Image: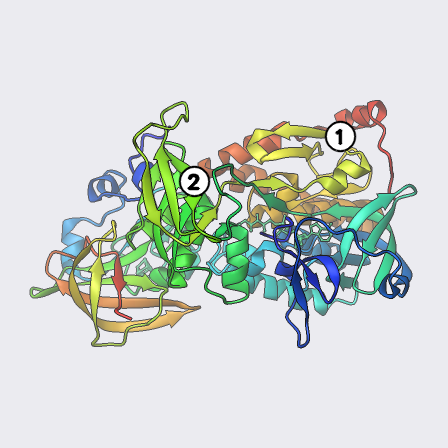
Amino acid sequence: MSEFPYRKTGVVSLEELARLNLLPPEERLRKGPVAILECPEMIPCNICVPYCPTKAIKMERLIDVPAVDWDKCIGCGICVAVCPGLAAFVVDTSKNDFDYVTVPHEFIPVPRVGDEVVLLNKLGERIGRGTVVRIWERNKTYVATVRVPKGLSMEVRAIWVKQ
Amino acid sequence: MIGKCSSCFMKVNGLPNVKTCREPVKDGLVIERQAGWISPDTNNEESSSVELREIDVDVLVVGGGPAGLSAALKASEYGLDVAVVDEHFKIGGQLLKQTHKFFGNVELFGGMRGFQIAEEYSKKLKSSEKIRVLTRSVVYGVFRGGLVGVIGENTHYVVKPKVVVGSTGAAERYLDFLNNDLPGVVGAGGVQTIMNEYGVKPGESALVVGSGNVGLIVAYQLLQAGVAVRAIVEILPEVGGWFVHAAKVRRYGVPILLQHTVKAVYGDGRVREVEVVAVDENFNPVPGSEKRFKVDLVLLAVGLEPDTRFFSQCGAVMKWSPELGGLVPLRTLDLETSVRNLYIAGDASGIEEATTAIMEGQIAALSAVSKLADRSKAGRAEEEMEKICKFLWEDYRTSPVLARARRGKQLVTVSREEMEKIRVTYPPRVSFG
Ligand SMILES: Cc1cc2nc3c(=O)[nH]c(=O)nc-3n(C[C@H](O)[C@H](O)[C@H](O)COP(=O)(O)OP(=O)(O)OC[C@H]3O[C@@H](n4cnc5c(N)ncnc54)[C@H](O)[C@@H]3O)c2cc1C
Ligand code: SF4
Ligand code: SF4
């Protein structure tokens, strides 16, 4: 059996991500949008690597865990769009009034800019409401940037749009 | 389910035992229910109007999934004549029902959705003059002298191939529980066919049995189709599939109940309720732990079993492999079985995944080229084959999430010298070439 709790829960905690060096440091978070790849297993995948426009994602072998060079990442969200594991997110905690989080969305309806959406955490719990500020699509995966209450950007990992 | 069982047998235009999951809808179709197997009328006019055709090819590919399609394409690139046979009306195998994006790397179609990979292959195959594609055609058996029987819509083909690549895929496993024959208990592949290939919502609320990648992915696809997924149950104390697939369904609120299994389903004519139960470390049900969910769909994703009937009939030496899902033929590194010139690739060679199926198909084809093509092409093919083998074994399969399949494949792979000895001890019933 595995020593990793996420193999039992399907949920990777912030502590675990930190332990695996998958979280950007505080000072980087304060600077502006940055990617978080919640991809802790050595799966045979490197799709995010060639698509990143600033070559911020490093991987030596196909099976390595992707490592983001936080200083190179510009938070563009392309990895969010292309990751087949839907494991890439962008968080922005640099503003005083709100946080921003960018998540993949493959459900209908697709929200429009300005729409209010339900915010879901890693357990699917409804933890508040946010407003869509940007939405774009790539090969049927929508990428939604949502303005969320301060402090929620590390929690929100999906949105739900009322039918 | 995925076109391999008999659950959907019905009479279509008077013809019994038609797998309706694979029957395209047309105006004027007359569909009647049937119970059990009905012996077809062998004297009717239709069966006597079947045309007999003989075909000579370099490579016959049995099954047009990712393994077969990549084999066909590779062999044709080196100038060999290829025929691909598939039972379905479209080529692509499992890829046709995969709406999610694939992993791997970009060169191996990673990032594309399964059905898009199938479309890409379809286009390439159609534009090749070297490849003949026979859809709605079943390879039903092999005859002495290395002749392969194929029955198509109105044609009976007898194919004489120099090399056969068997890429017949896999069949789904079923599970024993009370009332498991009620409509609404479906295999994952069946639901994917209905939902993703034909665009029909399969139910309103579902319970998924099995948390391997297939269960997790189908649960996500059910959510996308607007089906409420009440829970995923898993008998083991750990999620079976990859973390990223589990995380995808967890964040939409789907619980994964570990150490749980289905006990029974209830309903009048179709599933209305399912009862699950916790199990202890020895997989025995824990009395009093039963829970019920109101669902109209119970989706079984409890594993796949290689479809190796063609290989058994040819007399290929087989080995039981729990890691690979069942009985599979022994093979050399270049995927030749103990029947000379009969190759195996994809899920039929042991359950793995589409990316490895593609690589196996290429390896089998390149090995065939190295035997059949002129010397310069043969040399190039061998080099390419070595490169793919190296990537497959030394990069791709070293991922810990593939460790079990890798071990399984190692255990059924023998050296060429060993294979020669096996051929002497267990001479195959047929030979190709
Ligand atoms: C839900 C699900 C999700 C998956 N997700 C992924 C993923 O993300 N990434 C990945 O790499 N893999 C994935 N896979 C696995 C992948 O789809 C399979 O491993 C792959 O399709 C195997 O390819 P194959 O060519 O061996 O067999 P198949 O795709 O099963 O094709 C076999 C074909 O052979 C035909 N056939 C069989 N017998 C005969 C006969 N006698 N005559 C004529 N035709 C015949 C069948 O009709 C079928 O078309 C997934 C599988 C499932 C079920
Ligand atoms: S957000 Fe953009 S720059 Fe940052 S890792 Fe992703 S793709 Fe690269
Ligand atoms: S594309 Fe997604 S799943 Fe693949 S390595 Fe990158 S983060 Fe992981």
Q: What crowding class fits label 1: few (fewer than 14 Cα within 10 Å), some (14-19), or many (20 or more)?
A: many
Give the amino acid at mark 1.
Val
- SS type, badge 1: loop
Find out whether the residues at labels 2 and 1 contact each other: C-beta distance under 8 Å: no
Residue identified by numbered label 1: B317
Residue at image position (48%, 61%) is B99
Quarter in which the C terminus of chain B is drawn: top right
Residue identified by numbered label 2: B264
Question: Going by the image, does B282 lie left or right of B408?
Answer: left
The residue sitting at the front extreme is B268
Residue at image position (25%, 67%) is A145
The residue sitting at the left extreme is A96
Label 2, label 1: how many angstroms apart (C-alpha)? 39 Å
Label 2 chain ID? B
Residue B293 appears anywhere in the view: yes
Counting from the top left corner in percent of width and height, residue A94 is at: 13, 61
Q: Which of the 4 image quadrants contains residue A51?
A: bottom left
Residue B90 appears anywhere in the view: no
Q: What crowding class fits label 2: few (fewer than 14 Cα within 10 Å), some (14-19), or many (20 or more)?
A: some
Q: Given this view, does label 2 or label 1 mark the residue nearer the observer?
A: 2
Residue at image position (31%, 40%) is B291
Q: Which of the 4 image quadrants contains residue B127?
A: bottom right
